[in-house]
Image: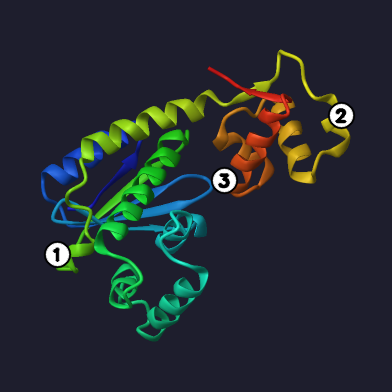
């Protein structure tokens, strides 16, 4: 039976544990004000993570991990397009010999964890679960042997760290940096001055992709213009 609601009423980690322990198959869609992600479950296991953010897609995760090259990703995506998207990217990459099933599982675990961190950090997240018949996908591309509880606990810790956010530094700062600020660095500083402190708030205030925002925050912290709160 389909279910939906707000994650403020039913915490995400409890919802996930209920679906996985019950061996459910279907699509769990999570929505915030800035993005939408879908967890595809197959008999209680994570079979795929779909995201509106290109940086959260499996191919990008494999690139970040150094498991494939841009050329290999483009080749696999071209083959996937021929099948009208009916075949999963991980399966195609393995058939081409570019990755192993363990590399796919590692990237899928990272996808899953990053999705949870983002959703847990959002103040207005909602969910909808729609049951579907079992997918019977390639067993090698299912996240079945990852310790789910450990992943969830780790994401809760990371979400708490991100909710703490950043603030203007209280110590000596490199003031010469102010004259050399890039437009995105200036936008983040202005948002912090307007009391936008958490990662979610800064994404919404600046419109920067999360990956870019994190790079900007790291630079501003290194320049001692900002510091981590908490």
Specify the color scheme. Answer: rainbow
The residues bearing labels 2 and 3 have C-alpha atoms spaced at a distance of: 26 Å
Q: Residue at x 45, y 81 (%)?
A: 78
Number of residues whose C-alpha sits closer than 10 Å to that of mark 2, classed few (under 14), some (14–19) or many (20 or more): few
Q: Which residue is mark 1?
A: 134
Q: Nearer the viewer, residue 180 or 131?
A: 180
Q: Please, which residue is most extreme toward the left here?
A: 22
Q: Earlier in the sequence, mark 2 or mark 3?
A: 2
Residue at x 68% of width, y 42% of height: 206
Q: Secondary structure at mark 3?
A: helix
Q: Residue furthest bottom?
A: 82
Which mark, by number, is residue 210?
3
Of 137 and 75, the residue lying toward us:
75
Disc 3 or disc 1, which is closer to the eye? Answer: 3
Q: Is residue 54 left or right of residue 26?
A: right
Q: Residue at x 43, y 31 (%)?
A: 159
State left or right for residue 210 relative to residue 152. right
Q: CA distance from mark 3 to mark 1?
A: 33 Å
- Single out the mark in the foreground, 2 or 3: 2
Query: Which residue is found at the position 44% from the left and 53% from the top?
Result: 36
Can residue 186 be seen in the rendering of this structure?
yes
State the mark number for residue 176. Answer: 2
What's the CA distance linking mark 1 and mark 2? 59 Å
Q: Is residue 48 visible?
A: no
- The numbered disc on residue 75 is none
Mark 1 or 2, nearer chain start: 1
Q: Where residue 190 sits: x, y (%)?
A: 76, 32
Q: Secondary structure at mark 1?
A: loop
Where does residue 152 sit, x and y in percent of width and height? 29, 36
- In primary-sequence order, the first of circles 3 and 1 is 1
Residue 33 at x, y percent in the picture: 52, 45
């Amino acid at each position: 039976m389909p279910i939906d609601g707000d994650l403020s009423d039913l915490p995400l980690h409890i919802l996930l544990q209920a679906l996985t322990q019950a061996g459910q198959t279907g699509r769990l869609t999570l929505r915030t004000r800035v993005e939408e992600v879908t967890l595809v479950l197959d008999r209680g296991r994570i079979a795929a993570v779909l995201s509106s953010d290109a940086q959260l897609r499996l191919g990008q995760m494999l690139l970040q991990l150094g498991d494939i090259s841009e050329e290999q990703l483009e080749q696999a995506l071209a083959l996937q397009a021929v099948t009208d998207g009916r075949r999963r990217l991980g399966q195609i990459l393995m058939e081409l010999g570019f990755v192993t099933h363990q590399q796919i599982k590692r990237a899928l675990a990272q996808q899953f964890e990053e999705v949870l961190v983002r959703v847990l950090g959002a103040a207005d997240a909602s969910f909808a679960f729609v049951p579907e018949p079992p997918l019977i996908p390639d067993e090698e591309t299912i996240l079945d042997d990852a310790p789910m509880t450990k992943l969830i606990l780790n994401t809760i810790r990371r979400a708490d760290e991100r909710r703490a956010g950043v603030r203007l530094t209280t110590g000596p700062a490199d003031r010469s940096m102010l004259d050399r600020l890039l437009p995105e660095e200036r936008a983040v500083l202005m948002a912090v001055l307007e009391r936008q402190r958490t990662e979610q708030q800064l994404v919404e205030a600046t419109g920067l992709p999360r990956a870019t925002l994190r790079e900007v925050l790291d630079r501003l912290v290194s320049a001692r213009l900002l510091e981590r709160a908490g």
